[in-house]
Amino acid sequence: MSITGEAEMLLAVTQLTEEYDRQARKAVRSGGQMFAEKLKADTPVSEEDHSGLGPLADHIKTGSVSIKTGDYSVDIGYDTAKGRIAHFPNSGTSKQSPQHFIEKTQSEMREPVLAEFIKDLKVN
């Protein structure tokens, strides 16, 4: 690509920035979806459901892509209906051993999510 004037250069920079933004959002969204699927698989399911809302794994929520902090991010976690109790099986109680399924998912998905980011951000 050859650029001969200031206006052409600014247009090229704008186009590159917009394309990068689309690709970055797609990469973060697909990595977040992979993480949410793995978190659902790793979340323990109990036979007892005192809330009547179903298992915790059915309450995983994926937010939209945000750049509030200057970095692209997407929040993945549990919804407000059952999210407040997720820390009990994860961290344990006096009557229940900790299962650390959230930390397990984070450590297991670090490499696959980064690989997905790289795949989505590669310029063809």
Image: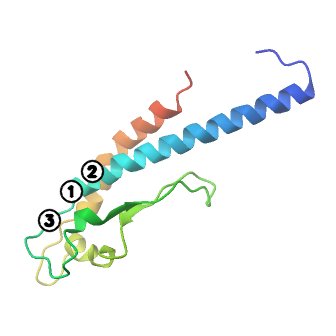
Residue marked by disc 3: 45
Residue 30, horizontal then vertical, whole percent: 42, 43
Q: Which image quarter is the N terminus in? A: top right
For the point 23% across and 68% down, the residue is 56
Residue marked by disc 1: 42
Q: Nearer the viewer, residue 25 or 91?
A: 25
Q: Count neighbours of disc 3 (C-alpha within 10 A) and say few if under 14, some if 14 to 19, many if 20 or more.
A: some
Q: Nearer the viewer, residue 38 or 99?
A: 38
Residue 109, horizontal then vertical, whole percent: 32, 47
Check disc 2 and give the amino acid type.
Lys
Task: Give the secondary structure at mark 2.
Answer: helix
The image quarter containing residue 45 is bottom left
Check disc 3 and give the amino acid type.
Val
For the point 22% across and 75% down, the residue is 53
Q: Is residue 19 left or right of residue 81?
A: right
Tell me the tag on residue 17. Answer: none
Residue 102, horizontal then vertical, whole percent: 28, 62
